[in-house]
Amino acid sequence: MILLKNCISHSGQVKIIKRCRELGLGSGGFYQPGYSTGAKLRLQMMCLGRNWDPERLYKDTFREIEGVEAPSIPDEFKHLVKGAIQTSHAFLKNSSKLHPAENILPSMSHDICIVNFYTRNGKLGLHQDKDESKESIRKGLPVVSFSVGDSAEFLYGFDRHNEAEKVLLESGDVLIFGGESRLIFHGVSHILENTAPRRLLEETNLRPGHLNLTFRQY
């Protein structure tokens, strides 16, 4: 599990916001996912590459209610993910002389991106990202998470029974967890108001909240 602080440049963050806004206004754009009971998640979501929802998981590539296909993952996003993994491997190579970086944090060919937008009262309970294929989970292929906008308090731990650790995800940060940490429990407990970089807000008119993109390989 590696946190790369301020990994995404200002221009990169601007591109992410503008591209997500463009995709989010399309037919496969942002919506509020929920359950058949009527309960809703406290966020807005958009799926790229392959559709996911809390009940149907990855069973098809369409949102059955709307009948639309998940948009493709933009090339510029793919380049950012590749760069983040390369940076992580360079860090691991310097910090661990006993094991190759690829053995600690495997590379992946991501084909899924889940985009979540948390407003100031948004949150997400502790959970595991375990709906990908058995092969992806077995290999420990990582989840790569981009943070843009207001800061988010991120919780993580290896089980539900002990108090979770906390880390602050600020605009431009990239969090990667894979290998032995692939199935950590994690969630978002709190969005910190008025913490987004002013310059970013001025150039993008991003609404208050935390934009999060998580990439993974099915």
Image: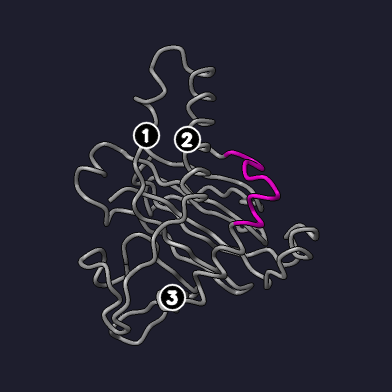
User: Which residue is at 67% across, 62% downward?
Assistant: 150
Disc 3 is placed on an element classified as loop
Q: Quadrant of residue 38?
A: bottom left
Q: Which residues are magenta?
A: 4-15
Number of marks present in the image shown: 3
Where is residue 26 shown, x and y percent of the image?
A: 47, 76
Q: Which residue is mark 1?
A: 107
- Mark 3, Cα crowd under 10 Å, few <14 / some 14-19 / many 20+, is some
User: Which residue is at 64% across, 54% downward?
Assistant: 13
Give the foreground label among 1 and 3.
1
Where is residue 121 shown, x and y percent of the image?
A: 60, 74
Is residue 173 rendered to the left or right of residue 108?
Answer: right
Residue contact at pointers 1 and 3, CB within 8 angstroms: no
Where is residue 37 shown, x and y percent of the image?
A: 30, 86
Identity, as a three-letter code, of the amino acid under mark 3: Leu
Identity, as a three-letter code, of the amino acid under mark 1: Ser
> Which badge, 2 or 3, is on the more N-terminal residue?
3
> Which badge, 1 or 2, is on the more N-terminal residue?
2
- Mark 1, Cα crowd under 10 Å, few <14 / some 14-19 / many 20+, is many
Disc 2 is placed on an element classified as helix
**Residue 41, numbered circle:** 3
Disc 1 is placed on an element classified as loop
In the image, farthest residue toward the top: 97
User: Which residue is at 41% across, 78% downward?
Assistant: 27
